[in-house]
Image (cartoon, rainbow, N blue to C red):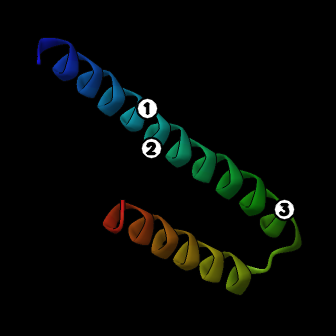
């Protein structure tokens, strides 16, 4: 039982770090897209992208 609990702890740590890396990936993608969009001054596209990214992140957190 002790080993089982250790394995479960390790798995939850791995799961948390994967979730953290996913959020970092979202931030990097958001940064690159916003640089691209702002250079063209498409404010509408930026706001749509921010909204969709926030929604996707919320959905990912809610169902994980």
x 59%, y 50%: residue: 27
Mark 2, residue position:
19
Q: Quadrant of the C terminus?
A: bottom left
**SS at mark 3?**
helix
- Residue that lies at the very extreme toward the top in this rendered image: 3
Location of residue 50 (image quadrant):
bottom right
Left or right: 59 as drawn, with respect to 36: left
Q: Earlier in the sequence, mark 3 or mark 2?
A: 2
Mark 3, residue position:
36
Q: Quadrant of the N terminus?
A: top left
- Is the Cβ of the residue at disc 2 closer than 8 Å to that at disc 1? yes
Mark 1, residue position:
17
Q: Position of residue 45 (x, y in %)?
A: 72, 82
Image disc number at residue 56: none
Residue in front for this viewpoint, 3 or 11: 3
Please, is residue 20 above or below residue 34 in the view? above
Left or right: 21 as drawn, with respect to 33: left
- Residue that lies at the very extreme toward the front in this rendered image: 1
Residue in front for this viewpoint, 47 or 51: 51
Determine the CA span between mark 1 and mark 3: 29 Å
x 81%, y 75%: residue: 41
Q: Position of residue 59 (x, y in %)?
A: 42, 72
Local packing at callout 1 (Cα closer than 10 Å; few below 14, some 14-19, many 20+) is few
Residue in front for this viewpoint, 5 or 33: 5
Please, is residue 15 above or below residue 43 in the view? above
Q: Position of residue 7 (x, y in %)?
A: 29, 21
């Amino acid at each position: 039982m002790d080993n089982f609990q250790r394995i479960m702890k390790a798995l939850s740590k791995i799961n948390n770090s994967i979730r953290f890396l996913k959020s970092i990936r979202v931030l990097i993608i958001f940064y690159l897209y916003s640089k691209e969009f702002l250079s063209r001054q498409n404010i509408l596209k930026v706001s749509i992208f921010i909204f969709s990214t926030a929604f996707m992140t919320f959905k990912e957190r809610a169902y994980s």
